[in-house]
Amino acid sequence: MKKLGNVLYVTTPEAYLSLEGETVVVKKEEGRALKLPLHNLEAIVCFNYPGVSPSLMGACAARGIGLTFLRPSGRFLARVVGPVKGNLLLRKKQYQVAADEAARLPIAVSCVLAKIANSRVVIERALRDHPMLVDTQALREASAFLKASLPAVRDADSMETLRGLEGSAAKQYFRVFGKLVLKQKEDFPFKERNRRPPRDNLNALLSFLYSLLTYEVASALEGVGLDPQVGFLHADRPGRPSLALDLMEELRPMLADRLALTLINRRQIKGSGFTRKESGGVLMDDDTRKKVITAWQERKREQIMHPFMKERIPIGLLPHVQAQLLARHLRGDLDAYPPFFWN
C-alpha cells in the first residue's frame, strides 16, 4: 500500500523555490530560507508569484513529485508532469470506454451513486449530532429525496438521464447545506452553490477545498497510469481534468463539505478572513488560507476503514486507492468500479 507523504504548501506570495542537491530551498525577499529534503515530499502546491526554478521542476517531474500552481483563490493554473506512467494499453482502454456511452455509463453511475449517498451522510450526521440545532424537517426531507433518487440513478439508461438525476440531487443537497452551519451564520450565509467567482464566504471556502481535492485526485490518477483529462461522467473540455472531477464527486462530501462545516462551526476560521473584490467575488486572506490548509492536512492523516479494501488507511490515500480500483476495473481485474461509500 502506498504511504501518505508530505505536501509542501507555499502560501507566501514572495517566496521562490529552487533546488540545491537533493533539497528544496524556499527563499524569501528578506533572505530567510527553508530547506526540505526532496525524498520527504509527495507533492508541492504553490500559491506564490515568483515561482519555481527549472531545475526543481525537472527534479519533481523525474521523481514523480506533484508540482501544482494555483491562484490564491485555489483556481488551477498549471501542473508540472513528468513521463507518462503505466501501461499504454490501460490508457487505450480508458479512451475506448470514454468514447462508448454504454461502456462508460456504469462507471459514471457508480460515481453518482456514491456522491449522493455520501452527501446524504453529511445531512444524516447533522441530524444525529445536532437534532436541537438544525431544521430537522428540511434536512429529513432532503435526506429522503436523496435516498429516493438512488434507485433511479442505479437504473439510468443514458448519460443525459444520469446527469439530470445528479443535478436534481445536488440542487436538493445544496438547498439545505446552509442549514448545517450552526455558528457564525451571519458571516457564512449560504443560499446556493455558486462559483467563478464564488460570491459568498462559504462558497469561497468550498471552491478552495474542491480545488485542493481535484488536483490531488488528478495526481493519483496519473500515478496509476490514467489520463486525468478523459472522464466518463464529465464531458471533455480543453483544460478540464474530467476524470479527476468524476472521482472527486464521491469524495468531496467527506473530505471537503464536512471539513468546511467543521472549520466554521468550531470557529477555526472567521468571516473577517474573507474579502469581497470589486468584481463581486470573495477571496480568503493568507492567514485563513493557511488555517484551511493545516486543517486539510490534519484531516488527511485521520484513519478510516475502506469499505471495499477492508483495510485501515489514512483519508489522504482515498484518491490513490480509488484511482487504483478504477485502473483495475479497466484492466479487467474487477467486474465493476467500486466507488467509495462513506459509512
Image: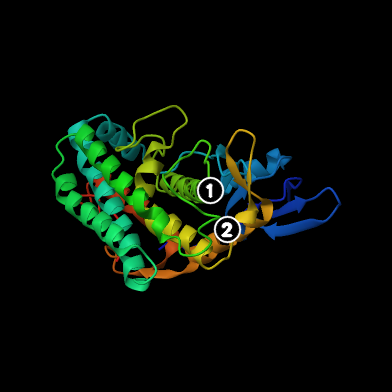
Cα gap from disc 2 to disc 1, whole angstroms: 9 Å
- The residue type indicated by label 2 comes to Val
Q: Is residue 251 left or right of residue 117?
A: right
Instruction: Identify whether 280 is placed above or below 339.
Output: above
Q: Is residue 45 left or right of residue 93?
A: right
Check contact, mark 2 vs mark 1: CB within 8 A. Answer: yes
Across and down, in percent, residue 144 comes to: 21, 57
Instruction: Identify whether 326 is placed above or below 138.
Output: above
Residue at image coords 53%, 68%: 266
Query: Label for residue 318?
Result: none
Query: Label for residue 208?
Result: 1
The C terminus - image quarter? bottom left
- The residue type indicated by label 1 comes to Phe
Q: Considering depth in this image, is 140 or 44 the residue closer to the camera? A: 140
The reply to whether residue 21 is in sight is no
Query: Label for residue 292?
Result: 2
Residue at image coords 45%, 27%: 238
**Within the image, what quadrant is residue 2 found in?**
bottom left
Q: Considering depth in this image, is 32 or 76 the residue closer to the camera? A: 76
Q: Secondary structure at mark 2?
A: helix
Q: Earlier in the sequence, mark 2 or mark 1?
A: 1
Q: Is residue 268 left or right of residue 90?
A: right
Residue at image coords 86%, 52%: 31
Residue at image coords 37%, 40%: 243
Instruction: Identify whether 133 is placed above or below 74.
Output: below
**Circle 1 crowding by C-alpha within 10 Å: few under 14, some 14–19, many from 20:** many
